[in-house]
């Protein structure tokens, strides 16, 4: 390794990472700095050694590739850390009717076509959207594109007590399909289609809706 009396070598990416790992394992680095701060400080120390011409400074043709590897690792680590934060926060969820300009009947027709084509998940999603859109058309829900599936189920349940459990279950399945990678079966599609019909034909119980 550089600094032990052996001839200087141009390190490969793996060798450079090994040197960096050994360097950061030294007691001097056992502090509260972030990994990014440690990488930066170590790189600056090596650069200072080179400028001052002291100790075990690496040759320029070795240091420059090594610093490039270090900076690349630092950027990668920062990207992974930020990505981890986004994952912990959970996926960002659009509203049920975000960017959807179709009427309830149009959504039902699209859902029926998707079901006919075997696209059961798409059919399930559109039938649930039809439930939400029809509630807006009946003035049960104030149009709000950002309203989530959970909010649709929770806000409609007091109007339709007999369908409350079905609304909440359908909302959960909607989220699982859109954001959890779940799929729908033909039986699921028939269930949400029947729910849409039941809600559409039921008389809402306005007196039971609390402010």
Image (cartoon, grey):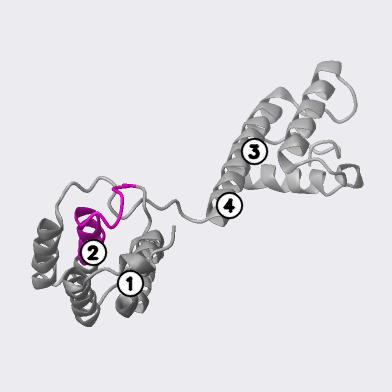
* Res 176 seen here: no
Q: Which one is nearer the viewer's eye here, 188 or 22?
A: 188
- Mark 3 Cα within 10 Å, few/some/many (few <14, many 20+)? some
Q: Secondary structure at mark 4?
A: helix
Check disc 1 and report the residue beneath it: 167
> Splitting the image into 4 quarters, where does residue 16 fall?
top right
> Splitting the image into 4 quarters, where does residue 47 fall?
top right
Marks 1 & 2, CB-CB < 8 Å contact:
yes
Check disc 3 and report the residue beneath it: 74
Whole-angstrom CA distance, mark 1 to mark 2, is: 9 Å
Check disc 4 and report the residue beneath it: 84
Q: Secondary structure at mark 3?
A: helix
Please give the range of residues in magenta: 125-145
Q: Considering only order in the chain, which callout, 4 or 2, is on the residue closer to the N terminus?
A: 4
Check disc 2 and report the residue beneath it: 131
Of circles 4 and 1, which is in front?
Answer: 1
Whole-angstrom CA distance, mark 1 to mark 3, is: 48 Å
């Amino acid at each position: 390794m550089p600094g032990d009396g052996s001839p200087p070598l141009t390190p490969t990416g793996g060798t450079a990472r090994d040197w960096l790992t050994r360097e950061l394992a030294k007691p001097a680095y056992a502090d509260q700095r972030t990994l990014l701060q440690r990488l930066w400080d170590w790189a600056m120390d090596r650069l200072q050694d080179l400028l001052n011409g002291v100790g075990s400074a690496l040759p320029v043709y070795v240091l420059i590739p090594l610093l490039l590897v270090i900076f690349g690792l630092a950027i990668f680590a920062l990207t992974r850390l930020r990505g981890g934060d986004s994952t912990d926060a959970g996926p960002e969820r659009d509203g049920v009717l975000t960017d959807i300009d179709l009427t309830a009947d149009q959504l039902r027709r699209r859902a029926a076509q998707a079901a006919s084509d075997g696209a059961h998940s798409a059919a399930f999603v559109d039938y649930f959207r039809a439930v939400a859109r029809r509630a807006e058309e009946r003035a049960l829900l104030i149009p709000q594109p950002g309203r989530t599936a959970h909010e649709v189920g929770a806000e409609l349940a007091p109007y339709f007590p007999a369908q409350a459990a079905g609304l909440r279950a359908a909302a959960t399945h909607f989220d699982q399909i859109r954001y959890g990678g779940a799929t729908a079966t033909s039986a699921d599609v028939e269930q949400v289609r029947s729910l849409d019909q039941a809600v559409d034909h039921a008389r809402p119980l306005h007196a039971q809706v609390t402010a």
